[in-house]
Amino acid sequence: MLLSNLKSSRYGRVAALAVPLFVLVCLFFFTWDPQPGRSLPRQPTPQPTPDAVPAPKADSKASQNTIPTSRPVSSAPSGDVVGGAISGISDKVWQSAKTTHLSDDQHDWIDSWLAKNPSFRYELLTDTSAVTFVRTHYAMRPDIIEVFETLPIPILRADLLRYLLVLAEGGIWSDLDVTCDTPVADWVPAEYKDDKIEMIVGLEFDFEWRGEGTQVASQFCNWVFAAPPSSRVLQVVVDAVVAKIKEIAALNRVPIQDLTLEMLPIDVVDVTGPKIMTIAVLDSLHQLLGRTVDDRDFHAIKKPKLIGDVLIMPGVAFAAAQNGYPQDQGNALVTHHYAGSWKEADAEAKEKKKQKQNGGA
């Protein structure tokens, strides 16, 4: 009995010492960090795919003047809101650039969109990430992918891309040299708030009708426009642009990848830019309404006008400077700063074509 009590007492003392020692060892094991100064284990660094563009480490002009490709703000909801600011249209602004290295002015112009529309999401696509986007969203349209990927003329690709982005996911397209002056939620008049709008465009040139058998005189700008996902109108625009590019390649008897600006029989605006967009938008309205839609429907409008399912803005809305800053059409919605560089290349191409036609070198 005495021996048993001694053993019990001895084991009790050992156990009493072992338990706290075991607890201390466990605490040391689970809290020990081989790299001092950090409290959480590092997550594996994601490896970008060949078509993905990693976002810069910081959104700072002092850090290589780059901007992340996606910039949701703190108040932005997860995902793109359809029917937020404008019924049916995603609360998102799209832009594109060759790379994420932008100028100070471009940073300021981008910030204007986020300041005026704090709940909107923002996405900037580069030359590389744009290819991934088109491949992903247009897998069922290999003709579109082929044209976009092989088209060697930057301005034509940039024009086509803007239509493809908004057609796929909806939202607002803005060139990098455009600032937002009026919140998007205030763009649509109250009388049209509940109407189905398939595209919002603004008059760049506002001209009178020239008569039967003539091409539309006015022109919608394509530096800013808006549409819902799978827009009926934008689909007509995309199809018209793709068909025109194929037509010009066939006319020159070259594959699309060998096209040059000098080969264009018409101006860039007629191939992928504002003019072909204008004609395609009006064609889409002809399909919808069963009648011709032209300058007579919207020339000299003083306020936004809904024709079919296209909301047409007066000249002051998107192109105040081009229209002489009219004082009787309400407020400007955006300002275009005309900082695009494509016109230089276009002018050079036209000069080379002229020299060739005149027998020059």
Image (cartoon, helix red, strand yellow):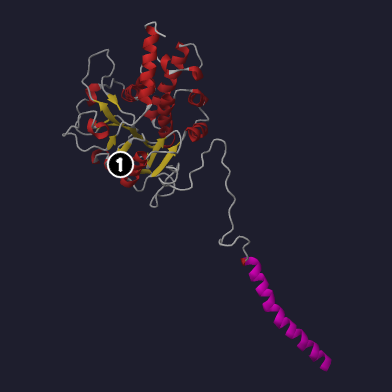
Residue 136 percent across, percent down from the top left: 52, 34
In magenta stretch: residue 8: yes
Q: Determine the image quadrant of residue 51.
A: top right
Q: Quadrant of the C terminus?
A: top left
Residue in view at x 39 percent, y 49 percent: 73
- Taking the image as shown, residue 129 lies to the left or right of residue 183, namely right
> Along the line of sight, which residue is nearer the eye, 175 or 197?
175
> Along the line of sight, which residue is nearer the eye, 72 or 48?
48
In magenta stretch: residue 151: no
- Taking the image as shown, residue 84 lies to the left or right of residue 67, namely left
Residue 96 percent across, percent down from the top left: 42, 35
Observer able to see residue 353: yes
Residue 262 percent across, percent down from the top left: 41, 15
Residue indicated by mark 1: 184
Dot 1: element:
helix
Q: Determine the image quadrant of residue 275.
A: top left
The answer to whether residue 257 is above or below residue 31 is: above
Q: Residue lying furthest left in this view? A: 328
Residue 75 percent across, percent down from the top left: 38, 52
> Along the line of sight, which residue is nearer the eye, 55 or 311?
55
Q: Residue lying furthest bottom in this view? A: 2
> Magenta: predominant secondary structure element?
helix
Amino acid at circle 1:
Val
- Taking the image as shown, residue 76 lies to the left or right of residue 137, namely left
Q: Determine the image quadrant of residue 357.
A: top left
Observer able to see residue 265: no
Q: Residue lying furthest top in this view? A: 359
Q: Quadrant of the N terminus?
A: bottom right
Q: Give the magenta-colored segment's residue range.
A: 1-30
Residue in view at x 19 percent, y 37 percent: 330
Residue in view at x 50 percent, y 13 percent: 254
Residue in view at x 63 percent, y 70 percent: 27
